[in-house]
Amino acid sequence: MPLREIDRDLIDRCLRHEPGAWTDFVDRYMGLIYHVIHHVAHARSLVLSAADIEDTAAEVFLAIVDDNYDILRRFKGTSSLPTYLTVIARRICVKEVVKRFREAELGHAHAHREAVANDGSAEAEPVAAADEVERMLAELDEREANVVRLYHLKFLNYRQIGKQLGIPENSVGPILAKARQNLRRAAEQRV
């Protein structure tokens, strides 16, 4: 389905930063974005809270406006805008859902900190953990350590890491995998 005139006009208005254009865009495509989020969660048999759904939708809309509407600038018009936005929203949603559930799996670390805090030694554990993490990261080369910090401690995505470190987005994953291997190997040698 080719690009409809109403969508072309909406894109042009957003790119020109016309007043009300972004509000019109959000009003037109909010339902689509929420549908994609629900579909991704359902396809993975996940239950998202209302807050998770809202946060994920916000991430999708933030990605659209990021870099002066770069996603809209890259739209070639060879498909309909809803189709294009569905693909974009799905990719972002999958990354967000994976990130959120990875963070939830690490919830045991938060529970442990709370238990330690209740025995009066709240200051010692986070400092000791931070020292241990930094000691482990010191075993990596600088680039690997920076990628690990940004991904696991700052929770940035590959695109954000690539932009911040000035490396291609598609090289972040391999760097991260190599860093994890090196950390695993170092941990095995310590045991």
Image (cartoon, rainbow, N blue to C red):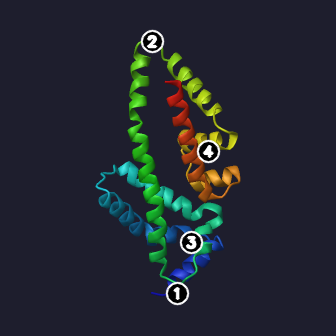
User: Is 183 left, or right, of 110 in this rendering?
Assistant: right
| Discs 3, 4 touching: Cβ within 8 Å | no
Residue 163 x %, y %: 67, 55
Quadrant of the image for the N terminus? Answer: bottom left
Residue at 44%, 18% in the rendered image: 117
Q: Return the mark for residue 21.
A: 3
| Front one among 108 and 173 | 173
Indicate which disc, 4 or 2, sits on the residue closer to the N terminus: 2
Neighbour class for label 2 at 10 Å: few (<14), some, many (≥20)? few
Indicate which disc, 3 or 4, sits on the residue closer to the N terminus: 3
Q: Give SS at disc 2.
A: loop
Indicate which disc, 3 or 1, sits on the residue closer to the N terminus: 1
Residue annotated with mark 2: 120
Q: Residue furthest top?
A: 120
Residue 70 x %, y %: 62, 68
Q: Residue furthest front?
A: 189
Residue 73, compared with residue 140, is above or below; it is below
Residue 127 x %, y %: 56, 21
From mark 2 to mark 3, how far is it between C-alphas?
A: 54 Å
Residue at 55%, 36% in the rendered image: 183
Neighbour class for label 4 at 10 Å: few (<14), some, many (≥20)? many
Residue 37 x %, y %: 38, 61
From mark 3 to mark 4, how far is it between C-alphas?
A: 37 Å
Residue annotated with mark 4: 147
Which amino acid is tagged 3? Ala
